[in-house]
Amino acid sequence: MTQLSPRLKQATPVVVDHGEGVYLFDTAGRRFLDFTAGIGVTSTGHCHPRVVEAAQAQVAKLIHGQYTTVMHQPLLALTERLGEVLPAGIDTLFFANSGSEAVEASIRLARMATGRPNIIVFSGGFHGRTVAAASLTTSGTKVRAGFAPLMAGVSVAPFPHAYHYGWDEDTATKFALRELDFLLATQSAPDDTAAFLVEPVLGEGGYVPASTAFLAGLRERADRYGIQLILDEVQTGFGRTGRFWGHDHFDSRADILVMAKGIASGFPLSAIAAPAALMEKAWPGSQGGTYGGNAVACAAAVATLDVIQSEGLVENSAVQGQRLVAGLRATAADHKEIGDVRGLGLMLACEFTTADGSPDTATATRVHAAAAANGLLLLTCGPFGNVVRMIPPLIVTPAQIDEALALWTTSL
Ligand code: PLP
């Protein structure tokens, strides 16, 4: 008899029958408030009628048309629509299927464009699990262990994780930039460095927002040395943080923007975007795969953008995020085991710590399980697994935020 890998069985205790909006229903008919959104993917809610309709219509017309042989209308339509939300000057797109693939495409482009080998990443960053993406990932040892040798040419500089260091944001930022300069002077000379790869908010690494001064420091060094600044917006894009792009909070500018997750409401799709002059440096045949930019996924992505714009989901993310974070902070005041509440928009987390400030993974694990038992699905993250995060669909209502807060308090 065939069976699931133990890793999959362990990871999926709830067997879902269907999803509707912010709720999932298991095969026994039990309802769960889904504050995971498939790890930040189903921003328009489960099975939004407009996304379903667009995908169903596309399935009946054309499911797959490989873009090196034929072009199809959904991919062209999506390219045009993304122009409405891309930062100025970032006007050329390339499509793939997953976040990891898009990250790989971005570093390949940076290497081809600069002719330099090295990539500098920032501690706690998560960029995926393919071998190259895992080589760029430092959010936890599990992602990297066991399949060395990893890709060469990767150096790690500190991310300004103020809470972790026990410093204020300014001190953490200055430290991170000083260490970056030291790294550029000792390990990865600017002339050998193709790119900085960074998340505007550390995702799997524990939901830690960068600072404006940190991203400005990266931008300034990127400009000074001809290094490409790659912003990995796989988790932070499409309104998740209460602005369309996570880096909008920090007044930053990417050379290459990486996106996935919220782009297509759950259909596998990812993309990189860059100025045309940069994207031209990738020669034909150097990027891409059989399924990238799938027609049904692109049609779903166009409908997703329609929903995000017409239903004001970026604004809702900001407003409901305020309500959720206020509720989490109020609860944390009575629970000393919650050492920090942080995040942006509807990308929020509570870090569990012991009295001496050490990671309290046991309590985070218990609360996560208790919440699921109470009907609230959450996720953990962070290098120690002691951070519990909430990333509901962006359609979430005030009543559902309050429902989640009540279940959260009961689960503590
Ligand atoms: N980059 C970031 C910031 C992510 O959060 C993730 C996934 O969580 C990835 C890349 C990898 O994406 P995928 O799992 O689709 O390969």
Image: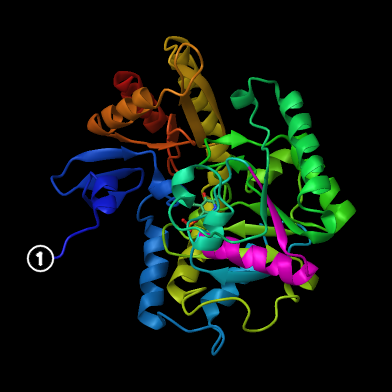
Taking the spot 82% from the left edge, 52% from the top edge, the residue there is 222
Residue 324 in view here: yes
Question: According to the image, label 1 marks what residue?
Answer: 1
Which residue is the extreme one toward the right? 224
Q: Is residue 365 above or below residue 22?
A: above
Q: Return the residue nearer the eye: 378 or 104.
A: 104
Q: Which residues are magenta?
A: 100-122
Q: Return the residue nearer the eye: 138 or 201.
A: 138
Prevailing secondary structure of the magenta residues: helix
Quadrant in the picture for residue 112: bottom right
Q: Quadrant of the N terminus?
A: bottom left
Q: Is residue 57 above or below residue 127?
A: below
**Amino acid at pointer 1:** Met
Q: Return the residue nearer the eye: 173 or 88.
A: 173
**Is residue 297 a member of the stretch shown in magenta?**
no
Tally of marks: 1
Q: Is residue 141 above or below residue 102?
A: above
Taking the spot 47% from the left edge, 84% from the top edge, the residue there is 65
